[in-house]
């Protein structure tokens, strides 16, 4: 999942995304996942930490494509998700 870190209620946004996935195909909600909080460069550290805590999920990472923040970790995350999800 990718959610804008400046979103007022990221947990609500995540809930909407999960609900849409469930409506499309319930099995998709059973697959391994990771939450990327995008545009971390637009928020200070306190705001990013607050959003991460409000997500209430340890499978979350703040990123910034513009500044390159945590971009190096995304490949490892994708590899892990594909391995766990039995993807080819």
Image (cartoon, helix red, strand yellow):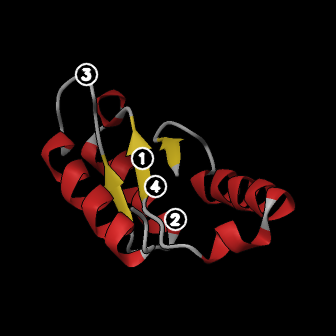
Tell me the distance, in whole angstroms, between the alpha carbons under discs 3 and 2: 23 Å
Camera-nearest label, 4 or 3: 3
Tell me the distance, in whole angstroms, between the alpha carbons under discs 4 and 1: 8 Å
Check contact, mark 1 vs mark 2: CB within 8 A: yes
**Image spot of residue 40 (x, y percent):** 32, 37
Q: Is mark 2 on a helix, strand or loop?
A: helix
Density class for disc 1 (Cα within 10 Å; few <14, some 14-19, many ≥20) is: many
* Image position of 57 (left or right of 7): left
Check contact, mark 4 vs mark 1: CB within 8 A: yes
Tell me the distance, in whole angstroms, between the alpha carbons under discs 4 and 3: 19 Å
**Image spot of residue 17 (x, y percent):** 70, 53
Q: In this view, does 35 lie above or below 85?
A: above
Identify the residue under disc 1. 37
Residue 66 is tagged as 3
Q: In this view, does 14 lie above or below 87?
A: above
Identify the residue under disc 2. 55
Q: In this view, does 32 lie above or below 11?
A: below
Residue 84 is tagged as none
Residue furthest toward the front?
Answer: 88
Total numbered badges shown on the rendered structure: 4
Tell me the distance, in whole angstroms, between the alpha carbons under discs 4 and 2: 6 Å
Tell me the distance, in whole angstroms, between the alpha carbons under discs 1 and 2: 10 Å
Q: What element carries label 4?
A: helix
Check contact, mark 1 vs mark 3: CB within 8 A: no
> Closer to the N terminus: mark 4 or mark 3?
4
Among the 4 quarters of the image, the one containing residue 28: bottom right
Among the 4 quarters of the image, the one containing residue 22: bottom right
């Amino acid at each position: 999942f990718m959610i804008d870190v400046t979103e007022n209620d990221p947990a609500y946004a995540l809930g909407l995304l999960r609900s849409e996935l469930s409506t499309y195909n319930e099995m998709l909600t059973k697959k391994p996942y990771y939450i990327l909080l995008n545009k971390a460069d637009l928020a200070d550290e306190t705001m990013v930490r607050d959003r991460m805590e409000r997500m209430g999920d340890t499978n979350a990472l703040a990123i910034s494509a513009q500044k390159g923040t945590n971009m190096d970790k995304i490949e490892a995350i994708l590899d892990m998700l594909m391995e766990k999800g039995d993807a080819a």
